[in-house]
Image (cartoon, rainbow, N blue to C red):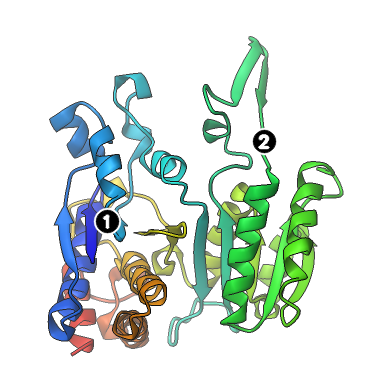
Amino acid sequence: MKILVLPADGIGPEIVAAGVSVLTSVNDDRKLGLELETDDIGLASLKKYGTTLRPELLEKARSFDGVILGPQSNYDYPPEDEGGVNISAKFRIQLDLYANARPARTRPGVAQGKEGLDLVIMRELTEGFYADRNLFMGNGEFMPTPDVAMSLRKVTAKGCERIARAAFELAMKRRKKVTAVHKANVLKVCDGLYLEQVRKVAEEYPDVELDDVLIDAMAAYLVRDPSRFDVVLATNMYGDILSDLASELSGGLGLAGSTMANEAMCFAQAQHGSAPDIAGQDKANPTSLILSIAMLLQWLGEKHGNDDLSKAGDDIDAALDAALADPATRTADLGGPMGTKAYGEKVAALLN
């Protein structure tokens, strides 16, 4: 199987290097047969090729089983007509990566984590309130007059049905509960369609409990008692906001893994940004990306019926638990002494 590695911007090269060191270690030790190939995106690509994402690289990605994608410094990119392509958005739309799984779990020994938190937010990625990806041509955000700004939200029956199915399939492997987040009391048409499709899919999964919660109430419930939730299903922006909240409650965004996938391929991507203020200083916590790589291995293992890949993903997750449980093997953001590189090496060593 082939994995494409795209380090990107800011702390991206450092955390990707740490993640790849863990992946290479387990790949070599267990003879998983993974082939890794690295290419440029982001500011490095802009300098070299005049664009943050070359069209030929996007097409090349289609031939890989998985991709490891580093964080991007979108605020530092020029306008798109000058080469500043929004990389994540372009991959999501062009490759139809509609399912974004974002787990949040309080890790043993991480004192700031909320007790009882163990959930996954299943977020739709290709439509919703994100106006830059809602139209076939043009942009869904515009100003009809100088003093009025408008934005379009897109919700489709197909988009709702397939993300709901992904959530219910995941719930069947966990605690068999799905919570659908919405604002149907106000957005009666868009969120009404969403709930209609979710309930239709739920009929196919009688063993899974379904409830629905308003988005504003959901934010409060997560803080009050996150243990009541298992799989949280949400449209694009709701899921984006709630996943950051859930991750912070688990101990911080640096601990939050993320994958985006369709039926054919999966991307591992840290949930946090590029943190240019600490780039190149060996200070970044690579846990998020390492966990995302573990999730990628689990996804590949399930898709291809390869237990060795699935177990490798599970073992990386367990090694992260072990590293985080010991204050001596944490990074500085969690009060530990380790830098990015040393932390990655420690996690790799715990796998042997």
Q: Position of residue 95 (x, y in %)?
A: 41, 45
Query: On the image, which quarter does residue 87 sit in?
Result: top left
Left or right of 88 in this view: 250: right
- The quadrant the N terminus occupies is bottom left
Q: Position of residue 12 (x, y in %)?
A: 26, 53
Please name the residue shown 22% across and 88% down the image: 350
Secondary structure, mark 2, is loop
Determine the CA span between mark 2 and mark 1.
32 Å
Q: Would you name the residue on which mark 1 appears?
A: 64
Label 1 amino acid? Answer: Phe
Please name the residue shown 64% across and 67% down the image: 232
Please name the residue shown 68% across and 42% down the image: 155
Residue 204 badge: none
Query: On the image, which quarter does residue 303 sit in?
Result: bottom left
Q: Is residue 31 above or below residue 149?
A: below
Q: Is residue 110 above or below residue 261?
A: below
Does residue 54 appear in this view?
no
Label 2 amino acid? Answer: Arg
Q: Residue 136 or 123: which is nearer the viewer?
A: 136
Mark 1: few/some/many CA within 10 Å (<14, 14-19, 20+): some
Q: Would you name the residue on which mark 2 appears?
A: 153
Q: Nearer the viewer, mark 2 or mark 1?
A: 1
Q: Is residue 154 above or below residue 150?
A: below
Circle nearer the N terminus (2, 1): 1
